[in-house]
Image (cartoon, rainbow, N blue to C red):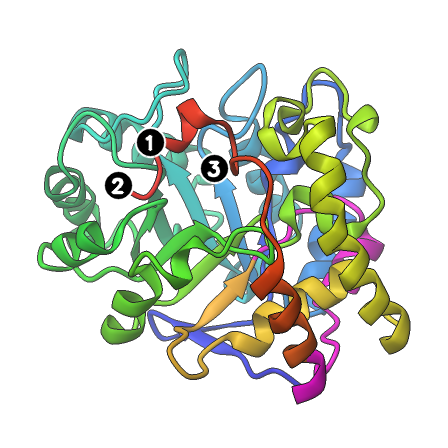
Amino acid sequence: MVSNYHIDGKSVGPTGLGLMGFSWNPDVVVSDEQAFEALKAAIEHNATFWNGGEFYGRPKPETNLQLISRYFTKYPEDADKVFLSIKGGVDQLTWMPDGTPEKIRESIDNSLKFLDGKKALDMFCLARIGKVSVEESVKAIKEYLDEGKIKGICLSEVGADTIRRASKIAPISAVEIEFSLFSREAETNGVFDVCKELNIPIIAYSPIGKGLLTGQLKPQDLSAGDFRAHFDRFKEENFKKNFALVEKIQQIAARKGASAGQIALSWIRSLSNTGNYPVIIPIPGTVNPKRVVENSTHIELNAEDLKEIDEFLATFQVSGYRYNQQMEAGNYR
């Protein structure tokens, strides 16, 4: 059993839910019926930290927010059960980070407009550092915090120094980064250290390696509209090398009577708030209600299991960038 955590005094489950897939892929239309069933399952299984985006949606950027609004219109009783984080600060024409005060205000105002008072904006997350300093961006977000229009501030894909600087401007409620068995940069780049020191929870997106750690995905399965088709680790030559880690996790999963994805998520939960690790809340994304339940089910990993994973990771070299070389340059700033 993994305990709940608290963000800004509000209890959240040890696993959350990423909402990007509900509206991002133009090749996949998710009906309200399916989406609502998945969102209901998340609440029922304590995956109460929901991570959406003001720019998550094609062809219309408001699609993700519209879906969230429709859900709370139908189920107003669920509004207080969920901690909602919305990411913004992105130019929706170029998809480039834009943290200028003007763009920040536009993003937050847009989010509040579509939520329409049906659900509080528990946290606004600056998508990445772009165009201006983090201090200038956080000052703009803080205006909404001071006015009570949002309840917390989150930073995404930021470095340790940036977190420290931002914390001097306003309280930082959470830091969102990619963290998984395939992406462990935060263990050595100072991000975990500063978040542990400042008691800032980590929101871990892509905790199953963008689906790679399920063991059920192959490069040829990715449609043209699937953003993963453009990322290095999913290129065939890298995929084959990276699958060695997947096979190791599958071995442990078979022994535990679990799925590979469950082992990957349970590994993160096992590290959370232990030793030098801050609180880490993984937010796997899925529109499948059964997968929501699976992802929320913790598999207890004993000392031998964790040692086996550590020993494998010590000799394993991930092949390819998290995204690609050009995009990688804009991360952890």
CA gap, disc 1 to disc 2? Answer: 7 Å
Residue 107 in percent (x, y) is at: 33, 31
Mark 1 falls on what kind of element? Answer: loop
Q: Which residue is mark 1?
A: 330
Please report the bounds of the magenta region as a residue range.
Answer: 283-305
Q: Quadrant of the C terminus?
A: top left
Residue linked to disc 2: 333
**Where 242 falls versus 160 (above or below)?**
above
Which of the two marks, 1 or 3, is nearer to us in this view?
1
Q: State the CA–CA distance, disc 3 to disc 2.
A: 20 Å
**Residue at the spot of label 3:** 53
Q: Is residue 302 visible?
A: no
Q: Is residue 257 above or below residue 72?
A: below
* Badge 3 density bin: few <14, some 14–19, many ≥20, Cα 10 Å: many
Give the farthest residue toward the front.
315
Disc tally is 3
Q: Quadrant of residue 95?
A: top left
What's the residue type where badge 2 is placed? Arg
Q: Which mark is residue 302?
A: none
